[in-house]
Amino acid sequence: MAIIETFDLTRTYGMGEIQVRALDGVSLSIEQGEFVAVMGPSGSGKSTLMNILGCLDRPTTGRYLLDGLDVSEMSRFQLAAVRNERIGFVFQSYNLLPRTSAVKNVLAPLLYERNRQRGREERELAAQQALQSVGLGDRLQHLPQELSGGQQQRVAIARALVNNPAFILADEPTGNLDSQSGEEILGLLRQLHGQGRTILVVTHDHDIAAQAQRTIHLRDGRLDRITRNGSGPKAVAEQEVERGPR
């Protein structure tokens, strides 16, 4: 079952004669339970694609189905609800509230639930359990400045998990970390994938991308190729994508 499906996505910026096409006919599919990386040089369109897949922006043309739901032409209000309920974000800079405890940072997405089916105690328990699942059960009341960079990113991952999203979207999740902390975060993402989570990582690091099942390479706003990753001498096979006329 596909969690993410896009059909001929385009995204154009500018007006009149000065226009930049950041995405140019991108069609892709990511299945439930996959671990996929997106790579590309500066100007390739990977940030634009991430913004659309994360429902932070809408395509100029084309369709985007998220877990079977067409979000291509939703209003900003509708997209905000989809982001909160169906997507778990992990950012390079953590994006934690600085004067708020770890458990309250994780609790934040639950405060915006539309139906509010869970009471206060149930929401707090869900936040505590999310922190426990990333190894921070003993850091519930710590402020971000009292945590290491790796621990702060674990809080961010717990926050991404607390609403049981359709997929986790991680943008350069190890970019601010030292090598050891970065490997621990990658290990945690692999663990979550092993539990059946769908993971999408946007990265410029080939070593990180190689740990995903597939790497989607973008160039000039279009799909360039898809690399299938793994271990062993025959693990990597590249599938060229038909680029077509510009």
Image: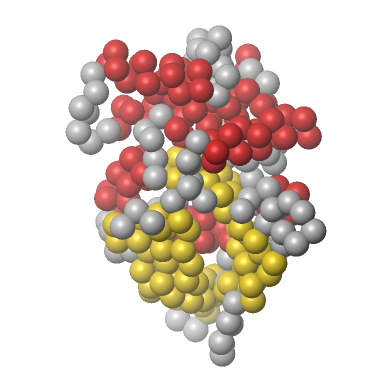
Q: How many marks?
A: 0
- Image coordinates for residue 149, horizontal then vertical, percent: 67, 26
Which x, y percent locates residue 178? 77, 32
Image: 18 above or below 28: below
Q: Residue at x 56, y 17 (%)?
A: 136
Q: How is the image coloured?
A: secondary structure
Q: What residue sits 52% from the left and 46% below the top?
A: 199
Residue 99 location (% of width, % of height): 51, 18
Residues 211 and 146: in front is 211
Compare residues 189 and 19 and report the one nearer the observer: 189
Residue 118, percent across and down? 24, 23
Evaluate whether residue 180 shows in this view: yes
Quick check: can you spot residue 99? Answer: no
Q: Is residue 185 above or below residue 60?
A: above
Tell me: residue 51, above or below residue 154.
below
Give the quadrant of the N terminus. bottom left
* Quadrant (top left, top right, bottom left, bottom right) of the C terminus: bottom right
Q: Quadrant of residue 109?
A: top left
The residue sitting at 50% across, 10% down in the picture is: 141
Q: Residue drawn at (37%, 21%), measured in percent from left and top?
A: 126
